[in-house]
Structure formats: structure tokens, C-alpha cells
Image (cartoon, rainbow, N blue to C red):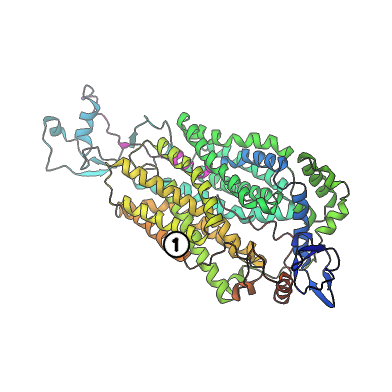
Amino acid sequence: MYRCVQHRHTQTHSCCPAAAPEMELLGEKLTHRSLLHLHCGNIKLHVGVDSAAAATMNFDSLLSEINGFGTFQIRLVLIQALSRVSLPCHFLLNNFMAAVPDHHCNVLDDGGLFGNLTQEQKLSFGIPAEPDGTPSSCQMFTKPQYEHLAGFNSSDEAFTVQCQNGWVYDNSTYQSTLATEWDLVCSRKGLNKATATIFFIGVMLGAPLFGFLSDRFGRRPLLLVSYLGTIIFAVVSAFSSSYVMFTIMRFLTGMALAGISIISIALNVEWFGIEHRTFSGVIISLDWTIGNILLVGIAYFIKDWRMLILAVTSPLILALIAWRWLPESARWLLANGKADAAHYYVTQCAKTNNRTKVMATVTPADLLQSAQVENRENKYSIVDLFKTPNIRKLSICLGIVWYGVAFTYYGISLNITGFGLNPYLTQFIFASIEMPMKIGVYFYLEKIGRRSGEVGALLTTGLCLFINLFVAQDKWIVRTVVAVLGKSLSEASFTILFLYTTELFPTVVRQNGLGFTSFIARLGVSISPLIMLLEDVWNLLPAVTYCAVAVGSGLVASLLPETLNTCLPECIEDIEKPRKGSRDKPAESEVEASTDLLLTCSPSSGQQGATQQQEAIV
């Protein structure tokens, strides 16, 4: 169907007799035919339509007719939320599971001669004091300094060594952690930080694996594999008898959780109508916030790390039960020729949304025909992201920005002990600030734009980190307020970048671009926990590093183009020679624009538009 621009009415096959030469294409009404003929007076236009694009638009039109954001979609989000709330619980679990309580060397009693002394007196002659008067965490005297009991604070033979008899831990906050289980403190504290890095490496490798498998075997069965894998590996890790066994199980747990992360996003997006996808993205991201708050409550009441792992994994048992009501992606089914199954789920969607009349005349063959595409091999790969100048610049800049955003976000999120507050309260504040920030980001993106939001969020995050460099440790209120503001801005940069990236990459390489940036982001996440080890060189060096990366990536983000109210690029040529136009205000002749596009861009494969956000990161 086409609308006569001059006379403002529609015709199905031929335009109005007034012979207006300008035609406006109604994309949502395209058929699956590869060639459309328009007759307008004496003018005959032949408009080539990419069959893959037409298929996507036809299915999206049908989805809109049966309500692309109805009860069916809400139920889908709620079922998925049962598994998605476990993601932040595991991703941020090291804040509590690997917490390092106050500790000092274990000073053995000298034959029970000083059994009547207080603990403070015993420490005074066995352990040197730090400048602030607290006992050293990693040093002890080679020989007991008994003269300290009489008030003398120096000795000619006051030599110190590393702890020789293990450590004594303060169990008032944490009953048991990885640090206390395997003495991962002092010279071994790097092994404690490495547990987070190994976990995120598992997430990094699991994402492309489950992405490939879900494209081949479907969303629903691979979600089941992810649920079962996460439960099994998490339970085994909770009963690990050695550090090596634990790290292997955490690595495998990270791989399984990556499947839940990317497949659930894809399944949700593929069932939402086009006009609701931005809003649905914000709704889905709230699962992270809810899970973050849930983690605080669970960790507050469960102080043993083994039981904590079991507790944060328990929502997956409910997800496993609810899996039977989880629909398969109709887009994936149609792309793989399974029309009967796709028709069943689409009919269920229409029935749940009270739109059964729409499906009265739609058969499985109609669905398959609407999704029929030319079975051409996709010749695009990740190499195409670096072949030509503009796409190369775009890919490099986005890679740097993704690295900076993920690196900074987890650098702040995994360091909740440096603000003078109870760690549970700090984590709760960090989690609570995310919800209003995400709502604010939604309105900002709709009214102002992506680039300014991303640049502003990263630069102000860096500013908050910079300010805290000069705030004394005892000014815990100021430090916490600045840190919470920085955390919220870091979360905003993450939320904006999800949408921004999908709008910047052309359709033909969008999946490759998202895969590349997600890999770079997870690389930043893996390295981020290890940066805290730099405090041994200079206690402010970790904060300086996070600040520099945030500011640097913010400056790089300023080099990216704005995408608000602009046409999405379809092929690489659109990046090298950008087209003018607006998503909200079409060009004067959409028919001419579509024709020009076909001259420069070959068809992309099947369900490109439906799955362009599949590689989203948590």
C-alpha cells in the first residue's frame, strides 16, 4: 500500500488519478514480493524491495496487530525475570563471597604462660602496629617483644616476618568467605581477586558459544541447558574441597550464566513489537536492579559463602519449573522453516492478548511466506568492521568505549568497602540508585540524544572518581555520596551504550559489531578486579586508573555520531557515505531512497532486524 503525498489518501495498486509524482512508502504494508510496480498517472515506478527486510516488516506488522506489548509479553518478561535476577547475584557475588575481614597473624601462646593476658596485650608483643595503631595484617615479630607489656615501644631486635602460623579473622561481619577458607590474604590476596576474573572469563567465552548454539538449536532448549548448567556447576562449586576445584566450577558457572544473559534478551526482544522495544529494553534491564537488591538481602542473612552460593542460585529452580510455559521465538522458528510451531506460538500470543480475530485467516503457510527470504550466504564477517575507513573508526571507538564503560562500572561495583559504611548498606545504596537512573535515561534518550548522554555520563563518572581522590577516608558521608553518584552515572553509561551501539552499526554487520564490542567489554570486566592489586604500589593508583579510563572513554565517545531521529544504516556504504533522513520524518521520496539503497547494499540474512540486540551484556 502506498500513500499519495500530495493528496493524502491511499491506494492499494495504483495511485490517485491526479498523477502526483511523489509517493510515500508505508513499510509496514509491504508484501513478500521482490518487485513492486507503482503506477501514478503516466509514471511507472519499479521499486525493488529486499525480501528479508519485507519479511521482517510483515512479521512485525502482524505482531503489532496481535499487540506487541500485551499480556503475553508481560508474562514472558516475568518468567524470564526468575532467571535474570540471578545474574547480578552471581556477577557481584564476590563482594560478599570473597570479602576480606579484618585479620592479623596467629600468635601462638608461649606454653600457656600468658593465658591470663587480654587479646590486646598478646597482640602488642607479637604483632607490630600500623601507623593508625591497628595490628598489622601480614607481619609478626620474629621474637615476642615482652617489653611492650611494660610500656616500652621499641627494641633493638624488633625484626618482623610474614605470618608464620596462619591468621586470625574477625567473624563479626562474615562467618566464612573464600579469604578465610583458604587464607587468600596478604601475599595470596591476588588469588582472591582472580576468582572474579576467572568467572568473567567464563562469561566472556560462554557468550559466543551459547549465541551460536541458540541460533542453531533454538532459544528455548538452550535456555534449559543454561538453567541446568548453572544450577549444577554452582552447587558443585559450593561444595568445593580446594581452591582449584572452586575456580574451575566458577568458570563453568560463568559460561552457563552467559547463556541466560544473552538468550533471554534475544527471546524478549523477538516477541516485542518495534514501537515498544526501547521501552521493553528498560523494563528488562530492571531485572538487574531487582537482583542486585535481592543479593543484599540474601547476603545479609547468610554469612557463610557456601550457603550463599546455594541461596543466590535458588531462583533458577523456579525458572526451571516455569520453563515449560516459556515460548520459543516465532522468528527463529520461521527462519528455520518450522511454520506449524511458529503458528502455534503466534496463535497463543494472540489468544493471550485477546486478538484471536487477527489470526482467523492466517495459516502456517502464510507465516512462512511472510518470513520467506532468499537463502543467500552471509558474506559479512568481523573482518568487515575494519576494512573501510569510517566503519573502522566506528568499530575502534566503540570498542574503546565499551571497554571503558564495563571496566569502570565493575571497578566501582566490586569495591564497596572503601567508603566507611557497612558493606551491606553500601551495596543496597548502589543497587537502589539504579532504578531512578534508568527511568531518567529513558526520557533523556527520547528528548536529547545518545552521544551527549554517553559522553556526559562517562565524564561525570570520571569526575566523581577524581573528587574522591581528595576526600579523606574519615569523611565517609561525602565519600559515599560522591561514590553513589558516580555509580549511578556509570550505570547510565551502560544503559545508553546498549541502545547506541545497535543504532550505530549497519544492519549487515550489526551482529558482528555487537559480538566484537561484547567481547571487548567482557575483557574489561575480567581485568577490572585485578586493578585493586595496584594499591600495593600506591594506595590511590586503582582509583586513578578507573578515573583515567572513564574520562578517556568519554572523550572517545565524543567522536561518535549522533543517532537520535536519524535513519538506521542498512549497509556499510551508509556509514562510508551517510544518507540524510530521519526516522520520524521520512525523506521526500522514500521510494527513491529505497531504490538507492538496493543499488549499494546486498540483502542481509533472515532475521537480522529481529535479533540485533542479542549480544547485550549484564
Residue 263: x and y, percent? Answer: 65, 49
Q: Which residues are magenta?
A: 87-113
Residue 616: x and y, percent? Answer: 59, 54
| Residue 383 shown left or right of residue 324 in the figure | left
- Report which residue position mark 1 lands on: 553
Q: Which residue is rendered at x = 40% and y = 47% of the image?
A: 485
Front residue of 57/215: it is 57
Q: Amino acid at mark 1?
A: Ser
Rendered view: 43 above or below 272: below
Q: Residue furthest top?
A: 116
Q: Which residue is rendered at x = 67% and y = 37% of the image?
A: 320
Residue 168: x and y, percent? Answer: 33, 33
- Residue 418 seen anywhere in this rendered image of the structure: no
Front residue of 606/366: it is 366
Front residue of 52/562: it is 562
- Residue 569 seen anywhere in this rendered image of the structure: yes
